[in-house]
Image (cartoon, helix red, strand yellow):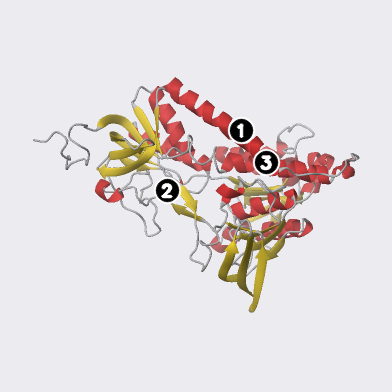
Amino acid sequence: MNSTAANTSTGQPNATPAEDIDILILGGGTGSTVAAWTFAKEGKRVAVVDRKYIGGSCPNIACLPSKNIIHSAQVANYVRHSEEYGITHGDMQIDMSVVRGRKRAMVSGLNAAYLENYKATGAEFVLGSGQFVAPKTLEVTLADGSKRWLRGTNVIVSTGTHATIEPIPGLIEAQPLTHVEALELDDVPRHLLVIGGGYIGIELSQAMRRFGSKVTVIERHDTLLPREDDDVTSELRSLFANEGIDILMNVKIARVSGKSGESVKIAIEHNGVEKMLEGSHVLVAVGRSPNTEGLGLGPAGIELTDRGFLKVNERLQTTAPGVWGIGEVAGSPLFTHVSIDDFRVVHANINGGNRVTTGRLVPYCLFTDPEIAHVGLREKDARAQGIAYRRFKIPMAQDLRALALGETRGFMKALVDDESGRILGFTVFGVGAGEIMSSVQIAMISGLPYTAVNDAILAHPTLVEGLSALFGSQPWDQNRNTQAAHP
């Protein structure tokens, strides 16, 4: 028998049998990375396969790099308005190569730290492109073209998502920016046309405007961030108007022409009127699509949903025994912190537990300036579901720390159960919103009534201290459509 004949059960040559791995992970995102380090510390043999990024997209091309760039834009805004703080300056210059270099230095440092942790824990990071060739078995093509075959006792798939490019005539040919390319710009766009008014489009629109770009946001819906409450979207539109960002709602895009980075035109229909928008760059931010193509999921017995995500149950098991899905590719909410909790679910279940994803309290923060943060029930959803609540709401100007900072734009809002006094939902549009929201989330997890937060001794003057002003205010009673007395 020829020793190099293909093994029909695994797809690899008989001379090179598959290596047995306790925990085999396809996709090196944050949840995967934490999984690798944790399982390896427990004495398991772990291998993570990723075709490009150490640690996945979050530390390389998404969460952390974007916040790095956004902070540079915030500093530019402070400098631009420094005279309001009694500080004068000369002409301000934006050097995007330096902005980019600062971001790249952070990414390089994170990569080095991640590799060091791989070494310390004993987990193996394999830089290569993996696809299933049999149940729980990957063929991995390495950078030099050679191959390895890895077979896992348990396999975790966490390949993430990528920016959706819709089939608009001329769009692909225009070579549009996604968030990946936008974070690598070495010049400030003269006029950035942003297709999509979601989280990514909103954050980058404000950042680029503060660097000096003219920015036009093109949104198909009748509001930005359509899932949010009306007071949030109204405040956001006011913020963008003040910063000189143009917003077009209810837009249908007919076609795109030109090339992003040089000159681009977008033919649209806006409120029944045909228009032509012209800019230097176009950024696409209309959503995310799962990275499942080319993974060989069929031979592995792994099924997809009708939207192309991994089909998983509440324990994050796929349709293939011993194969698990975590993070965005498994249809989880598109946040890094959720992928980490997905790991906790899978970790517990592989070790004999029974942990599920249902009933999770998922927070999020939009890193505009000021930030928008939310956890729990939205007011529009409470009304739609007929849930009785009382609403506490104050402007950020009543938060004394925000007042001292001169950052008084926005508001805090909490929904409280009408009978128990437990906090059902919380939203902040304001400075430090993410940190304030996290404090309330802990109270919600603990099942505390809002009075426990109101009665707490909170350090003065801190942003979190504003919760005392919030929960000490007169609530609005949703049932009676009137101001309500405290219980």
Q: Which residue is mark 1?
A: 106
Q: Position of residue 372 (x, y in %)?
A: 66, 49
Say which residue label 2 marks: 329
Q: Nearer the viewer, residue 486 or 193?
A: 193
Is residue 483 visible to the viewer in this orientation of the structure? no
The crowd level at tag 3 (other Cα within 10 Å; few <14, some 14-19, many 20+) is some
Amino acid beneath label 1: Met
Number of callouts:
3
Name the mark on residue 97.
3
Query: How far, Cα to Cα, is label 2 from label 3?
Result: 33 Å
- Rendering quarter of residue 280: bottom right
Does label 1 or label 3 sit earlier along the sequence? 3
Residue at coordinates 62% horizontally, 56% vertically from top-left?
261
Left or right: residue 159 versus residue 272 is left
Relative vertical location of residue 385 with respect to residue 148 in this rendering, above or below = below
Amino acid type at mark 3? Ser
Amino acid type indicated by mark 2: Val
Taking depth in this image into account, of 160 and 326 the one nearest to the observer is: 160
Q: 405 or 440: nearer the eye? A: 405
Foreground tag (1 vs 3)? 3
